[in-house]
Image: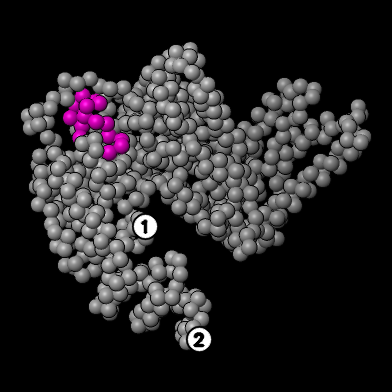
Amino acid sequence: MRALEIARKLAQLNETEKACQAYTLVLHDRSGLDPAVELEAALYILQFGSGDSYKISYTVFCDLYNQGFYKEDILQVMNGAFYAPNLKLMQTRYRKNCALLEKYPYIFRKDFLKFEDLPICFYPYDDNSYTPYYIKEERFGDYINFKETEIKHYFFKDLEKPILARDIYSQYELEYLRDNVRRSEDVARENHVYLHYSDFSEFCAYLACLNIKSLLEEKKIIFLFEEEAEQYPIDFKERFHIDYSQMSVRPLAIREVKKIVWHTQLSSHNGGDLFNEVFDAHPNLIMMPSVMMTNIQETVKQVRDVFDQCESLSEAMQSFTEWDDPRLIEELYHKKNRTDKDILVAMYLYQKQYSQFLDPNSRIVPALFFQPHFSNIIYSLKADAKNRAMLYSEVYETVRNSPLFLGFKYIKTFTPMRRFTTSHGGTVRYMDAKAAEANNSRGEDDRPTVISDAISERVLNRSFMIDRQDRIYRDSVIVRFEDGKLNPKATFTALAAFLDLPYTESMTYCSDAGEMDPHPETKGFDPAPVYKTYDDFVNDNERIFIEYFLRDAYEYYGYDFQYYDGKPMSEEQVKQLLRGFDTMDSYIQKTWKLVFAVAKVTHDGVDGDSSLEETVQRQMLDHYMREILANRENTVGILMNKLYFVGKNGQPLHMMPKLEPDPALLERPLYH
């Protein structure tokens, strides 16, 4: 093995950095590799590596141990390098957690094990992740990130009884339950969160890693172990002499809302209205239909500025008479550290046509359903230093850095997707109609509205590809429009489960502010829009081009090709397709003709009175179309390399997971 020889030679020469790089190459493909060589490489990297390189060694050690190789030696290394340096911290955390639980009224078993008797040891992997070592079984388990920002369980499927969750060890999910289940005192009925653990000794072991203190302060949680599950639900009036029914339901406070359901806009004409209409009037959602992101940002800023200038509560009341909810105004006024997120929630809550459907007695805090809209989503593409296709979108950066999103602790993201060629055809039709409307009514001095190269924008728009470390997409899923139309019950049952919302009667029909079937043109659950082809707005060359350059997405999301034959294509074949974009080009030219028709002859930077001659107008239009063709060819040159993309930080982008409709509820075969 050449890499191994190089690594050993470099090690002998004390070229430790280069030797580590060579040993890393040795471990790159471990299939068939001698375990002794794996151990040698891992030990060297652990000793001389830098940064996160220790993680390579850590992983190799765990794998070799579980395969039965060098168990005694590896355990000694793992203990010395990872366990012992963190032992005191875990012992302290364990004892503090046990002490807190011993004083807690709603845990009925308190015979906590001694630390040295715990059945699981946790070996730190990084600041948040650990690998459990099961002592009796003598094996390492899978990595556990206790702060992983993903809700993996369907906690709120049924709200008839108090929430019962089993064997939950994620710190993030435990805090999610604490934050999103309302207090019994707030809903005037027994509403504790019941956490049942099937093995008490295992629960004790996890106390070395969890932060229990933050979960106990409001006394929302009841701990049950093993056979204690029979106690669920507890009669608090009989057992603790607390009668919640004598209390009054408390209105929702702005800062109780900590979860956002982000309905993202993948591109134009993806069928997003269908999803808005299904989630309309949901009793556990604060919801409004799609709204322009720029409008929301401007309105939030205006509201903030007014509150900042108000010197008294009465002045604030007079400034927001249209809100018709003095409680919200008072709450915002008294929050001197009010955030954009606070303002956004209040703005949604005061509009009764949307908040009137909330269940005031619900066991859970409603989530904010938010669909910020953008006039267009454009990605730029260029090759980075490693000749990888790098994507950048100003829209994406706006969302990723927006305090409107980052103010929410819990983000559930879903993205409707429609067959790309169908979505493109609908987009061109819409662009043509809007351009015609604008140009027919424009003033003499107004610049004509133009149609852009929607095909290039389409193949570069990879909003369905995400950086897995990005918080706003960490807990996200793609939902196919066709599934929602053809199998609505199966699709929306699965989507409700992903979003951790009950599947309610309000999700069985389409509405807007409670009005049934509000948009006849979208036809509710009628599947007719699935089969639209928009032949007047897209031709076969354009469809082949779209399918070819989005072929990885077609495969991943389950769409069959309708125009592209699936065979490899040369760059020349693709460029030949470009010369057949007659339909797209005709719509571009139609609007740009107006631009050049109203252009004036310029003298020394000042527009003259005379328009350009028709011949010059034609020449300028031809020049513009040649620029578009050149841009398309440049895009092709980059994309032909490979369909591998990175974000602006060089991190590889991955397909957003696809929602799978509940197979037991399918009414029609899945769309292909």
Q: Residue at x 34, y 31 (%)?
A: 256
Residue position for label 1:
127
- Classify residue 43 by image quadrant: bottom left
What x and y, as percent, mark residue 66?
A: 27, 72
Residue 428 horizontal side relative to residue 625, left or right = left
Identify residue type, mark 2. Leu
Q: Which stretch appears magenta?
A: 178-193
**Separation (CA) of disc 2 from disc 1:** 34 Å
| As drawn, 321 above or below 300 | above
Residue position for label 2:
13
Q: Residue at x 22, y 58 (%)?
A: 91
Q: Residue furthest front?
A: 311
Residue 451 horizontal side relative to residue 618, left or right = left
Q: Residue at x 51, y 33 (%)?
A: 372
Relative to the observer, which residue lies in front, 551 or 447?
A: 447
What x and y, as percent, mark residue 33?
A: 39, 80
Graded by Cα atoms within 10 Å as few (under 14), some (14 to 19) or many (20 or more), the crowding at tag 1 reads few
Asked whether residue 218 is drawn in magenta, I would say no
Residue 600 horizontal side relative to residue 139, left or right = right
